[in-house]
Image: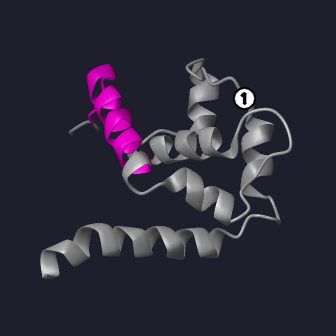
Amino acid sequence: MTSIAQINENEQREIEGTLRKFFIDYRVRDLLKGCRAEKQKGHSAFQIFRYLLCLVFCDRSMYMQIITGRYSEAFGKNTVYRFLNSARTNWERLTCALSARIINGSIHGFMT
């Protein structure tokens, strides 16, 4: 029986660095603002979105981080849930605009 390999801290830092470059290259912060992903107070929507995307690529879950005591973010789980359930945020527009930027910025360059 094989076990699932765990991501060590160096690999997690590498993933976070890659995501940081991705957010800068594709101006994700501007896209979030354009899609009305906003918060009225506290931590920015960008910080929460960055955390959630990092969870996906690091193969983690917020629930397991909380249970194991490894959750170290400054915002709580209710903040994350309210952000994800916000009726103001146009998630479809965000995904379409981000995919368009990726296609125009990366893939389109290979075709010409």
- Find numbered disc 1 in the image and state the secondary structure of the residue it sits on: loop
Residue 47 in which image quadrant: top right
Please tell me whether residue 67 is drawn above or below residue 97 in the rendered image: above
Count residues near mark 1 (Cα–Cα under 10 Å), then give few for <14, some for 14-19, many for 20+: some
- Residue at the spot x=59%, y=47% of the render? 49
Q: Position of residue 69 (x, y in %)?
A: 60, 17
Please tell me whether residue 30 is drawn above or below residue 65 in the rendered image: below
How was the colour assigned to the protein in this rendering? one colour
- Residue at the spot x=51%, y=54% of the render? 28
Please tell me whether residue 5 is drawn above or below residue 86 in the rendered image: above
Q: Nearer the viewer, residue 112 or 19?
A: 112
In this picture, which residue range is highlighted in magenta?
5-23
Q: Position of residue 93 (x, y in %)?
A: 61, 75
Quadrant where the C terminus lies?
bottom left
- Residue at the spot x=52%, y=76% of the render? 96
Tell me the residue that label 1 is attached to.
75
Say whether residue 112 is left or right of residue 29: left
Q: Nearer the viewer, residue 87 or 58?
A: 87
The residue sitting at the right extreme is 40
Residue 71 in which image quadrant: top right
Q: Nearer the viewer, residue 58 or 104?
A: 104
Q: Is residue 78 visible?
A: yes
Q: Position of residue 98 (x, y in %)?
A: 47, 67
| Residue type marked 1 | Phe
Secondary structure mostly seen in the magenta stretch = helix
Q: Position of residue 55 (x, y in %)?
A: 49, 41
Q: Is residue 7 visible?
A: no
* Residue 10 part of the magenta segment: yes
Say whether residue 27 is left or right of residue 74: left
